[in-house]
Amino acid sequence: MDPGDTSIDELLAAALRNETAPWPVDEPAPDAIDRVAIVHGIAGLLIERAPLLAKWPTELIARLREQARAQAMWEVRHRQLLMGLLERLEAQSIPCLILKGTAVAYDLYGNPSSRARGDTDLLISVDDVANAKSILAALGFTGETLGGVTDEFALQQTWTLALSDGGRHSIDLHWQVMNAPSLSRLFDFQECWAHSRPLHRLSPLARTMDLARLLIHTCLHRAMQNNSPYFVAGETYFEPGRLIWTYDINLLAAALSAEEWSSLVSLAGEMGVARPCLGGLRAAEATLGTTLPDGLIRELEALALNAPGSRYFARSHPLSRAWQDVGTVPGILPKLRYALSRIVTTEEFLRSKYPGLANRPLPWLYGRRLLDAMRRRPDAS
């Protein structure tokens, strides 16, 4: 059973709505619910609601508690490492913004470790990339393979620190918020920095986007999973309805003031992303009972009628998105270099992308990559 199983998803969502969640008559196996809850990233949130789950099997609660405890232990060490990194960046006068899960965890979650995640996303200016990478390397982090493009066109890179006890901590370093050339106009670093807010619970040096931009980014990240996979325990999933993202949206929506909602509508219109914002907000309203301002949906629906920026977030063929990206790279020669970098990638990238085929000859891996580019997902429209 995976996320998307309606009965299990609704059982878990009811608990997140703080409703007493009785164990169903047609009992699914506890290990199935445990696995789906972990894929949804909500073990810690469920344990916070343990009194509402009194009739759930004790073995299931024990498994969820174990997962929540492991996440809490990871959180302690991760925060220490992150604080050290922020201090190094500050010493080199490199401004940075915390994005996504870590930002919401230390802004709106009662217990940050209840916001399950495996890394922290940092946004910096493109001018600071080289210095930031040097700092990460000096702290023992290793830069992982770029996402199938050359250095010239890379927009982010994951850096990972492997600890002696087997733990791993990753920093996803962004110099553009969204990892696609055609989405470069959506979030300007200087604009985001000018409207940034402190994250005092994380560090005196930590800052994140304003609430309106943070909510928009959360909705866009959710929508990107229509086409981009996420990974849990080595398994691959395509599922925008992951409950931890919906819960983020729920918390952010509750935190926005009337003025910030107005800002969100304006920004969504300017960016042309009203449609994926609608998708995220409607999902939170339907799944978790999120309260939205009167008239908000109508305003976003009107903006979504003419929102070309939304095309990239709709379920689509990979060649369609690649064509959009090529079209936004300025200049004929750079377009050709970008297209070539997407086709003729590095051997290191191919072997990391297809670990099960890592021992096959390189032409075999290129053939698999070409096949993936040509075929559409079975449920794509």
Image (tube, grey):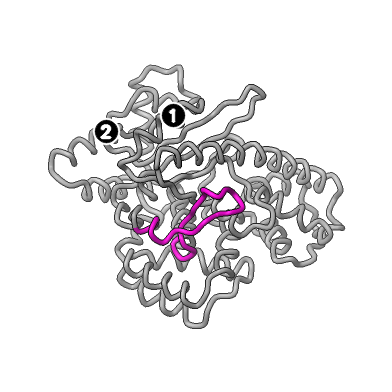
Q: Earlier in the sequence, mark 2 or mark 1?
A: 1
For label 2, the SS is helix
Q: At label 1, which amino acid type do we have? A: Gly
**Residue at left 55%, top 68%?**
253
Q: Is residue 298 above or below residue 195?
A: below
The C terminus, quarter of image: bottom left
Q: Residue furthest front?
A: 91
Q: Which mark is residue 341?
A: 2
Q: From this viewpoint, is residue 379 visible? A: no
Q: Is residue 111 above or below residue 373?
A: below
Report the side of 37 relative to 236 (left or right).
Answer: right
Q: Which residue is mark 1?
A: 143
Seen from the viewer's position, the closer of residues 47 and 128 is 128
Q: Residue furthest bottom?
A: 294
Measured Cα–Cα span from mark 2 to mark 1 = 19 Å
Q: Is residue 94 above or below residue 299?
A: above
**Residue 211 shown in magenta:** yes
Report the side of 253 relative to 347 (left or right).
Answer: right
Q: At label 2, which amino acid type do we have? A: Ser
Q: From this viewpoint, is residue 343 visible? A: yes
Quadrant of res 371: top left
Q: Residue furthest left?
A: 332
Quadrant of res 8: bottom right
Seen from the viewer's position, the closer of residues 329 and 103 is 103
**Rendered location of residue 301, percent (x, y):** 40, 75
Quadrant of res 163: top right
**Rendered location of residue 265, percent (x, y):** 41, 72
Q: Within 10 angstroms of label 1, few (less than 14), some, or many (20 or more) residues?
A: some
Magenta residues? Answer: 191-213
